Amino acid sequence: MAADRARVLIVGGGYIGTYAALGLQRRLRRGEASLTLVSPESYMTYQSFLPEAASGNIEPRHVVVPLRRVLKQTRVLTGKVTGIDTQRRRATVAPIEGEPFEEPYHVLVVGAGSVSRILPVPGLGERAVGFKTVEEAIYLRNEILERMDAAETTDDPAIRRRALTFVFVGGGYAGIEALGELEDLATEACRYYRTVRRKDMRWVLVEAAGGILPELGPKLGEHALERLRRRGVEVHLGTRLESAEGGVMRLSTGESFPADTLVWTTGVRADPIVAEAGLPVDDRGRLPTDAFLRVREAEGVWAGGDCSAVPDLVTGGICPPTAQHALRQAKRLARNVAAELRGEDPKPFRYRQLGYLVSLGRHQGVAVILGLRLRGFPAWFAHRTYHVFRHPTVNRKVRVMSDWTLALFFRRDIVQLGSLRRPRAAFRHQDDLTNPD
């Protein structure tokens, strides 16, 4: 499409939205097109650093990138796209405040991402927390330290057991990295408590499959399991969480025990807003695209990342929902959209996975890089090195590396700010005392 001042609307501020906007900013000439990005948050989260943000190795603000700061040539709207009319090429935007309005477009880029895949487990919605956002990472850090505080201030053995039992469901990347880093945090924090020791804690991993981290192969998966078990993590393979009602974890093996902390990391699904907006989706709620990242049966619409089903031209099937693929899809998408606006031919997306990197905490990890299998410190170091170079902007790279450098000389911060969840509690209490009626 050749157009004067074409309108490009981007939905989502994750990997796809942010990197597609960055690519278009670089490739489009001034006045060639206007760029607008709609996102529920005004920042992009680099999810690979969430475990270290939760454990205190990285300042949480340093794993997020403010969109308005990096997308200087893009109009950023904070809100949600609730409807898309592909015939009129208009999207309905619901801002964080005010009435919904229509936003016209010539080209629509959808990168809405994914949400946690929830199963019908009784009590799950009331008890569990996911691990996809920086808010969840901060909450878990505060929750674990708060539970340690609760155990320190009581002699009741039942309360202590419940408070010091931490359950993680899901043996994929998110679950294993979160468990490894948070167990590391809690173990180090024990030195500051008089009555809470590592042996008092119960860390439980529940996985429905027969192993963990299947993408790395059985040998590295077994190595990761052995490292976790050596640290005292209780692993239940081939097991499902049947119920979490009343804070009692009931497993498919028949075992049950109370726990205050439940982390759910059993995979993701496409953000339901994609289907709700009226776009054509497959049976898994994803946008089916061609090899050029154009959405089928929706003219002028492009997509990538977790909310899409992009053909894998290298291995066949559909591209996996990994950050590596999303980053490359966003860059190809930006090139293809710019080419279409200039009347040029787009190119197909083709990418071969370079490998897999998993941190286990305590300077340990497992990795497969271009077929080379690593374990221990080399894998952990490769994980950090790769992701710091992939982290957007020099500003954030420097801040993350500064956090790591300071950690070499100072012990981990164990301040828990759980009261941040109730910022008005103290004010309301004083108001109740002052105005009892």
Image: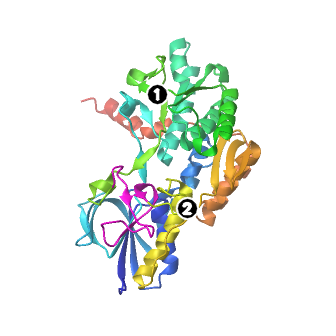
Residue 224 visible in image: yes
Neighbourhood count class around disc 1 (C-alpha, 10 Å): few under 14, some 14–19, many 20 upward: some
* Three-letter residue code for mark 1: Arg
Q: Which residue is mark 1?
A: 240
In the picture, measured across the screen, residue 74 lies left or right of residue 402, that is: left
Residue at position x 58%, y 63% in the image: 392
- The answer to if 261 sits in the magenta stretch is no
Residue 19 visible in image: no
Measured along the vertical axis of the image, is residue 327 above or below residue 362?
below
Residue at position x 69%, y 43% in the image: 365
Residue at position x 57%, y 39% in the image: 178
Q: Secondary structure at mark 2?
A: loop
Residue at position x 51%, y 63% in the image: 313
- Which portion, as a residue range, is magenta? 282-309
- The answer to if 308 sits in the magenta stretch is yes
Residue 303 on image: x %, y %: 41, 64
Residue 330 on image: x %, y %: 49, 66
Asked whether 147 or 117 is in front, the reply is: 117
